[in-house]
Amino acid sequence: MAPSIVSERPRESLMSSQLQAPEPEHCPGPESEQAGKGDACDGCPNQSICSTQLPKGPDPDMPIINQRLSQIDHKILVLSGKGGVGKSTFTSMLSWALAADEDMEVGAMDLDICGPSLPRMLGAEGESIHQSNSGWSPVYVADNLGLMSISFMLPDPDSAVIWRGAKKNGLIKQFLKDVHWGEHLDYLVVDTPPGTSDEHLSVTTYMKETGIDGALIVTTPQEVALLDVRKEIDFCRKAGIKILGLVENMSGFVCPNCKGESQIFKPTTGGGEQLCKDLGIPFLGSVPLDPRIGKSCDAGESFFDSYADSPAATAILDVVDALRDQVELSVEGLKLN
Ligand code: SF4
């Protein structure tokens, strides 16, 4: 049986029961130092309670979270400015590509709480997680590739998850605190929702002490997507997250029949590569549109197993190599500092 979605600590239950109204969407958390004082609290009916009565201070769960995360060598956040650019698709392919190395232990964490799609893409739809003395066990889609997603905890895959910020925060904390990835993980790839929202703030806060290697940003070439990428880059800079690089997805389409190439999403301002030059971040490469990618994701199969020789597979593997180079550079930079 799947564990209950949120087994809140007594301290949090106490807080929630003391509040006059549910926490609003951008609540920083009634137990945070900013509770009742930050801009997000303006107009909240709980302001007087949060600013005076509730216990505050260091989160007592942080030592456990840090201990769990210390067993993971590299943590990568996958971000996108908007939805529909193929972020989760790319996350699934990144996970398959990393796990293609049998010596590597890889974890994928689906933090897109309102739209979890990794279970489908990684072939784990309908699975449920199990609890052991060590914590929650991820669902293994390959010997060395584990997956954790909220969808494993939902009674009905079509259920909408309508949660406010504090509840999402509680689940993310629980994922980081209770999931047992094994003795050691080489890579944890974290799929996040589009934009910059509660999920991003929560995961970066909880991972800050053990460190995040950086963010991989996924975009499409057209300006309307790049506009939001600039905001995502700004978020990373403000949150102190290193940007490992940007990948331009759906970049051109080669017709499988006539072999003619066309630009479905035309880059009117130079696309992702020009944006990277302008903003001084690494450009990791472009991935062409290939309808077989969607087909593989729908079937929950590795695209690389089915279409290893396709131009899209080559392009994705080049991006993954470039990303791993950036991760190594990042680690070397930290050693030198
Ligand atoms: S419940 Fe309201 S006052 Fe309390 S921390 Fe959240 S937003 Fe601020």
Image (cartoon, rainbow, N blue to C red):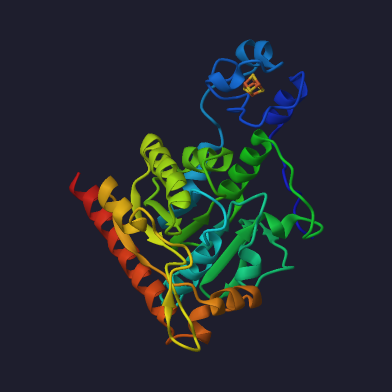
Q: Image quadrant for the C terminus?
A: top left
Q: Is residue 229 visible?
A: yes
Q: Image quadrant for the N terminus?
A: bottom right
**Where does residue 208 sit, x and y in percent of width and height?**
42, 40
**Where does residue 111 sit, x and y in percent of width and height?**
59, 51
Ligand 1 lies in quarter: top right
Q: Is residue 181 visible?
A: no
Residue 142: quarter of image: bottom right
Residue appearing at x 77%, y 18% in the figure:
20
In this picture, is 9 found above or below 274? above
Query: In the visual, does 240 lie left or right of 299?
Result: left
Residue appearing at x 40%, y 48% in the figure:
212
How many numbered circles does the render carry? 0
Query: In the visual, does 50 lie left or right of 78?
Result: right
**Where does residue 50 sit, x and y in percent of width and height?**
64, 16
Residue 254: quarter of image: bottom left
**Where does residue 116 sit, x and y in percent of width and height?**
65, 57
**Front in this rendered view, residue 113 or 6:** 113
Residue 71: quarter of image: bottom left
In this picture, is 46 found above or below 190? above
Query: In the visual, does 234 lie left or right of 173?
Result: left
Residue appearing at x 34%, y 46% in the figure:
242
Query: In the visual, does 30 lie left or right of 326?
Result: right
In this picture, is 206 found above or below 324? above
Residue appearing at x 52%, y 79% in the figure:
303
**In the image, farthest residue toward the left:** 336
In this picture, is 59 found above or below 138? above
